[in-house]
Image (cartoon, rainbow, N blue to C red):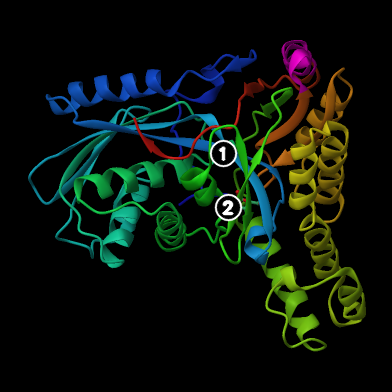
């Protein structure tokens, strides 16, 4: 069972864990390299060649944090790092998945949908979960062999779980001869995560991984699932810094945040029964209901209501190429997540402070659920290399931890290569 808000496809240690990866600024290897690794792994494990490869990216959220499960707005983008799945139908009623990062192959019969999910290895539950959820939604499934290779650090908050879910879903749609509907696939992946991984996540990660376009961030309305592609200016560097603190022991904190939002909604409904979620509430209405809720619920709701306006504001700033305004919005978001939503950490606050002290940095904030994981910074493209060096050096010197810096252009969502 995953331990964070957004479940992560976990890499056991020792082995290929992120500590072994270079902490130096890096641009991601192109998907083709990851695809080649998946192909080779497939050949080695299954003794034949795959018929195709799917690539599913990770994601970083630019703004709109903890708004998705409040029916609100988010602005994530897919990144160049991700997961490749090489595949081939096997002619049996069996799903077999090999994960290069785990050095392990697991299999499940497609004829036996009742075997308890706890009986499967942690990483394989994503495969079993997505297959069972697709079957329950009426998809035909064909027996398939899959080899996975990933460049996403696990537990870093870059949605390795959504990447594994959607890469497998995409493969199973091909081998089952089913049409591909990215929105529907995102909903199925979210449902699989709720039912089989036990994480009550929102829809942001799965939608970003399923629907993002290259060069664009995805402005998503989490109630209607309508989307708008937002151009990210060519002179904007998106720099992600992993704090080297995994988001462990955070599931209960994530669920606590959700519960506080629900308490706030229940209090507000005494005044406005038409309110369904914090998405429907403005600051004035929240204030009227203040005495009906506990102080924690009020703080959490205050964050959500202010944060919910930021995705559209950031989208507009990016569209105009106004990096100054974009950066300020990110800084406001971080302060709100730290002070009102209380999901930051010493390390994430330090990374944000270090980022803002570097030339060319317009703004920075924690990204994802919080409680560890990554920050994202908006940096002049020309300043990205010195920025990345400086932040990594200073963070390492201050904490002894090994940050990982990922520089990424907005990438395309899950795709057949
Ligand atoms: C995790 C969840 C998302 C979202 C973010 C916080 O990533 O998986 O659904 O709630 O946290 O914005």
Q: Is residue 374 above or below residue 206?
A: above
- Residue 407: image quadrant is top right
Mark found first going from the N terminus, 1 or 2: 1
* Residue 387 lies in the magenta-colored region: yes
Position of residue 369 measured from the top left corner of the image (x, y, whole percent): 66, 48
Which residue is labeled 1 in the image? Answer: 59
Mark 1 vs mark 2, CA separation in Å: 9 Å
**Residue at the (71%, 33%) spot, across then down:** 376
Observer-nearest of 182 and 252: 182
In-front residue for pair 414/18? 414
Residue 167 visible in the current orientation: yes
Q: Which residues lie in the magenta part?
A: 380-394
**Is disc 2 placed on a helix, strand or loop?**
helix
> Does residue 387 appear in the picture of this structure?
no
Circle 1 sits in a helix, a strand or a loop, which is it? strand
Residue at 73% x, 12% y: name it.
389
- Mark 1 is surrounded, within 10 Å at the Cα level, by few (under 14), some (14 to 19) or many (20 or more) other residues, namely many
Q: Does the residue at mark 1 contact the one at mark 2 (Cβ under 8 Å)?
A: yes
Residue 38: x percent and y percent? 31, 25
State yes or no: residue 412 in magenta: no
Instruction: Report if the beta carbon of the residue with label 2 is closer than 8 angstroms to ligand 1.
Output: yes
| Residue that protrudes farthest toward the front in the picture | 320
Along the line of sight, the residue nearer the viewer: 90 or 300: 90
The residue labelled by disc 2 is: 204
In the image, what residue occupies the spot 85% across and 51% down?
Answer: 336
């Amino acid at each position: 069972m995953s331990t964070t808000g957004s479940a992560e496809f976990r890499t056991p240690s020792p082995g290929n864990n992120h500590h072994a990866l270079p902490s130096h600024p890096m641009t991601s290897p192109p998907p083709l390299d990851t695809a080649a690794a998946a192909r080779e792994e497939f050949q080695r494990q299954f003794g034949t060649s795959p018929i195709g490869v799917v690539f599913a990216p990770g994601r970083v959220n630019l703004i709109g944090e903890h708004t998705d499960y409040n029916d609100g707005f988010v602005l994530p983008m897919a990144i160049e790092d991700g997961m490749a799945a090489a595949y081939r139908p096997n002619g049996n009623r069996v799903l077999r998945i090999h994960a290069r990062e785990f050095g392990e192959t697991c299999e499940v019969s497609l004829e036996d949908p009742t075997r308890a999910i706890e009986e499967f290895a942690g990483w394989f539950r994503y495969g079993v979960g997505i297959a069972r959820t697709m079957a329950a939604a009426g998809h035909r499934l064909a027996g398939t062999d899959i080899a996975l290779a990933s460049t996403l650090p696990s537990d870093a908050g870059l949605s390795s779980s959504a990447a594994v879910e959607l890469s497998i879903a995409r493969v199973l749609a091909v081998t089952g001869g089913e049409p591909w509907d990215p929105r529907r696939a995102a909903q199925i992946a979210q449902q699989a995560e709720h039912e089989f991984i036990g994480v009550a996540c929102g829809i942001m990660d799965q939608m970003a991984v399923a629907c993002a376009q290259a060069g664009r961030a995805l402005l998503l309305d989490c109630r209607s699932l309508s989307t708008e592609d937002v151009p990210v200016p060519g002179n904007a560097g998106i720099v992600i810094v992993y704090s080297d603190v995994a988001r462990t022991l955070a599931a209960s904190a994530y669920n606590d945040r959700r519960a506080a939002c629900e308490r706030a909604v229940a209090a507000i409904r005494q005044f406005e029964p038409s309110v369904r979620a914090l998405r429907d509430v403005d600051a004035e209405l929240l204030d009227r209901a203040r005495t009906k809720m506990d102080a924690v619920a009020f703080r959490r709701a205050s964050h959500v209501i202010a944060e919910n306006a930021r995705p559209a504001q950031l989208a507009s700033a990016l569209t105009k190429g106004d990096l100054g305004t974009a950066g300020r919005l990110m800084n406001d978001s971080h302060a709100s997540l730290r002070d009102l939503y209380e999901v930051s950490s010493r390390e994430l606050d330090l990374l944000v402070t270090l980022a803002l002290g570097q030339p060319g940095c317009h703004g920075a904030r924690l990204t994802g659920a919080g409680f560890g994981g990554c920050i994202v910074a908006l940096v002049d493209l020309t300043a990205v290399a010195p920025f990345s060096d400086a932040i990594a050096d200073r963070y390492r010197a201050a904490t002894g931890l090994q940050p990982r810096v990922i520089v990424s252009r907005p990438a395309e969502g899950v795709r057949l290569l």
